[in-house]
Image: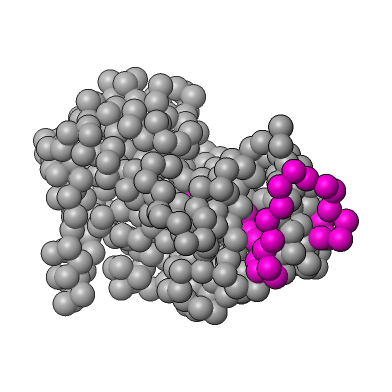
Amino acid sequence: MSATVITNIGTLVTNDPSLRAPDPLGLVRDAAVVIEGDRVVWTGESGKAPAADDRVDADGRAVLPGFVDSHSHLVFAGDRTEEFNARMSGRPYSAGGIRTTVAATRAAGDAELEANLTRHLAEALRQGTTTFETKSGYGLTVEDEARALRLAARHTDEVTFLGAHIVAPEFADDPAGYVALVTGEMLNACAPHARWIDVFCEKGAFDGDQARAILTAGKAKGLHPRIHANQLSYGPGVQLAVELDAASADHCTHLTDADVDALANSATVATLLPGAEFSTRAAWPDARRLLDAGATVALSTDCNPGSSFTSSVPFCVALAVRDMGMTPGEAVWAATAGGAAALRRTDVGRLVPGAYADLVLLDAPSHVHLAYRPGVPLVTDVWRRGVRVVREGAETPSNP
Ligand code: NIG
Ligand code: FE
């Protein structure tokens, strides 16, 4: 197997827990990384790097782990431009808009849905995302949910069953009947294609008792829980996430002190999704409060056509630094190692021997520029599983 050394790295973000103090990013200056096959085999100072077959000169620029986007909704058709436009004229966001995408997704063929998915994945990869989770939730019938998961599973191992996104329109007068479907026939059809189960626990979607029933049924089928929690209002989602040892409570925009304490004293990650607050003109989640309490925080895009139509983790990093009280280092950690923690993974989100060789090269001397130069396409090269899939000056990849 041939080895490649990326050398002359100005700032290397390793997220190596053993280099954590004083900086959680485990920074190494004037660094090198050696890749063999799909793995990192060595990191350290450039001058000490072992010999390799190929050499890439980073020319003093920054290298960091590929972003781990632990929350997206990429199996959908249609768009919601009009809804966004109306929102920017003052109309509030509500869960009901999901129905527009459900209708478009049900009407779409498999090829259209998969083409849409791969287009967004290519877009995300170009911006440095090397691991992503994605969900069903725009089908809401047994067949349409299972189809969404089958398509997603062709592109990632991190697939989430979200039959409980909203109550399907056909069950508008019988929410209990829909919960029975989700926990019965739909779960049976979907569980083989998914790793995770999720519920939108919110007014207008599912209450705490319904969410507990759905997640408990999913656990019994071998799926691990994660929850859309406390996005639009205070509610039981975060406490339920902790009670069920969910890998992540996602959104966490409206938190009581008890919610923050519960997260800080659990293995449940608080995943913040600032693209949603941006696109819904909502108050920002308070990352500083969570970090100061000792909670683990992840940052992800929530990429979906309704509440957050961005695939850009760098954009989310910039928002989190500007408006949510995070330092650039905390935000970059949250978008890499934090996302990995939200997926209960240690083989991504860090550059240490044995981890996947998922790396991003920035046209900047350090990771701080992701927030300092918002909106600038700083990601020039991306290695995924040891393969250089994005290369400075080359065409955007079409089929990640
Ligand atoms: O995470 N909150 C629930 N689901 C998505 C929104 C989906 C939509 O509006 O289509 C979210 O923001
Ligand atoms: Fe979401």
Position in image of residue 162 (x %, y %): 34, 38
- Residue 141's place in the image compared with 132, above or below, is above
Residue visible at 32% across and 38% down in the picture = 136
Q: Is residue 363 left or right of residue 172?
A: right
The percent coordinates of residue 256 (x first, y second) are 49, 64
In the picture, measured across the screen, residue 256 lies left or right of residue 117, that is right
Q: Position of residue 60 (x, y in %)?
A: 70, 70
Q: Nearer the viewer, residue 56 or 77?
A: 56
Q: Quadrant of the N terminus?
A: top right
Residue furthest right in the image: 48
The quadrant in which residue 161 appears is top left
> Where residue 90 appears, x then y in whole percent?
18, 76
Nearest the eye: 86 or 44: 44
**Residue found at x 29% / y 33%:** 148
Q: How many marks?
A: 0
Residue 274 within the segment the image draws in magenta: no
Front residue (pair 252, 316): 316
Asked whether 54 falls inside the magenta stretch, the response is yes
Residue at horizontal 81 percent and vertical 60 percent from the top: 46
Residue 294 vertical position relative to residue 243 in the rendered view, above or below: below
Residue 195 seen anywhere in this rendered image of the structure: yes
Question: Bounds of the magenta span?
Answer: 44-69
Instruction: From the viewer's perspective, tell me whether residue 28 is left or right of residue 81.
Output: right
In the rendered view, would you say 263 is above or below 9? above
Of residues 328 and 266, the one nearer the viewer is 328
Query: Which quarter of the figure has residue 13?
Result: bottom right
Residue for point 21% across, 50% down: 98
Residue 237 in view, yes or no? no
Image quadrant containing the C terminus: top left
Q: How is the image coloured?
A: one colour
Horizontal relation, residue 166 to residue 334: left or right: left
